[in-house]
Image (cartoon, rainbow, N blue to C red):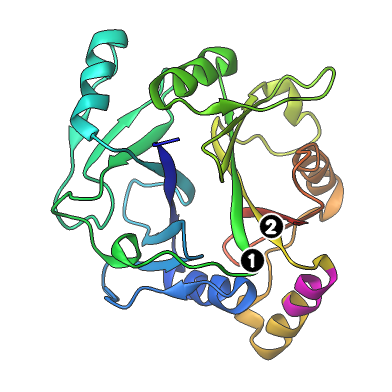
Amino acid sequence: MSAKIRHIAIVSDQYALEGRFYEAVFGMRTAADKRPERAVTVSDGYVGLNINPRKAGRAGGLDHFGVEVENAERVCARLRERYPAIKVLKRPGTRPFAGISTHDPAGNLFDLSQENMENRTSVYVEPPREQARWISHLALRTLHADEVAEFYADLFGFERLARGAGDTSHYLSDGRITLILTPWSILDYEGGGIARPGPDHIGFRVENLQAVKERLQAVGEDNPHLRPFPVGAGPEGQARLALFERCPYGAHHFADPDGVLLDIAEK
C-alpha cells in the first residue's frame, strides 16, 4: 500500500516536557535537527510525533495527522475531481512534514507529503528503524463516520479491517497503522465532560504491559512533572474513562502529562 500514516501532531502548553515523556516511557527518539523554539519532534522509527507549542487561538491536545503518498499532486487532483468542496492549502516550508494540508468531509485535518518535497526534514528523512514500543493506531471521533471511512478508503486505498458484531466504528489500515473512525454522539458523554469531534487518542503496541506500567511509575517518581495526567478521577472521570475503554485495540488506558489520551496493548 503506497499511502502511509507517518505523522501525528499535538499542540501543547508543555511541548518540551511532552517530548521528554515520550522519550522516557516509549523510547522514542528526538530529532537530530532540534528546533527548540518551534517544536519538539520525536519518532518511533516510523511515525513522527510533532509536539507544537500552543499559540493564541489554538486548542491544546491531539491536532491532526499526516499521510505520506507517492505523488501529492495526484492525490490533490483526485480530491478536486471527486470531492470539489474540499480545498487544499500549501504550507510554509518551515513544516518538517506538512507540504499540503487539507481535510476530510467532516473537517478532520490531515497533511500530505511525499519523499522529495523540499520541506522534508527531521525524523521524516531519517532511515526507518524498529523499536519495542511503537504507535499502532490513531482514533478519531467524528460526525458522518461512514462517509469519512469511505473517503479515506477511496483516497488512499486504506484497507478496511473486520469489526465485531454491533461495533459502529471503522478500522482502516495502511499496512502498519490503523486509523479508527468512531461515530461522535453527544449522548456518549452523559455523566461526563463533553469532548468535541476530532482526534481522540493514540495507541501503542508494547512488548510487555506490566513493564510499561512499571516504567510509568518509575518515571513519575524520578520526575513528578512527567507523571501521567489523571484519568478516571471522580464520577465524570469514570464516565469518560468508560467511553475511552470501548476502543478494542487498547488494554491499558491513561494520559500523557498534558492530558492526551493514550492506550497500550501487547504485540
Secondary structure of residue under mark 1 = loop
Residue drawn at the location 32% of the way across and 56% of the way down:
55
Task: Identify which amino acid the numbered label 2 is placed on.
Answer: Arg
Q: Which residue is mark 1?
A: 133
Q: Which class describes the residues within 10 Å of circle 2: few (<14), some (14-19), or many (20+)?
A: many
Q: Quadrant of the N terminus?
A: top left
Q: Quadrant of the C terminus?
A: bottom right
Q: Look at the image and give the residue range highlighted in magenta.
A: 210-215
Cβ atoms at labels 2 and 1 below 8 Å apart: yes
Q: Which residue is mark 2?
A: 205
Q: Considering depth in this image, is 13 or 253 the residue closer to the camera?
A: 253
Q: Considering depth in this image, is 21 or 153 the residue closer to the camera?
A: 153
Residue 64 part of the magenta-drawn span: no
Distance between the alpha carbons at the discs numbered 2 and 1: 6 Å
Residue drawn at the location 73% of the way across and 75% of the way down:
216
Q: Is residue 119 left or right of residue 33?
A: left
Question: x%, y% of residue 20?
Answer: 51, 77
Depicted 81 relative to depicted 229: above or below: above
Task: Identify which amino acid the numbered label 1 is placed on.
Answer: Arg
Quarter of the image holding residue 186?
top right
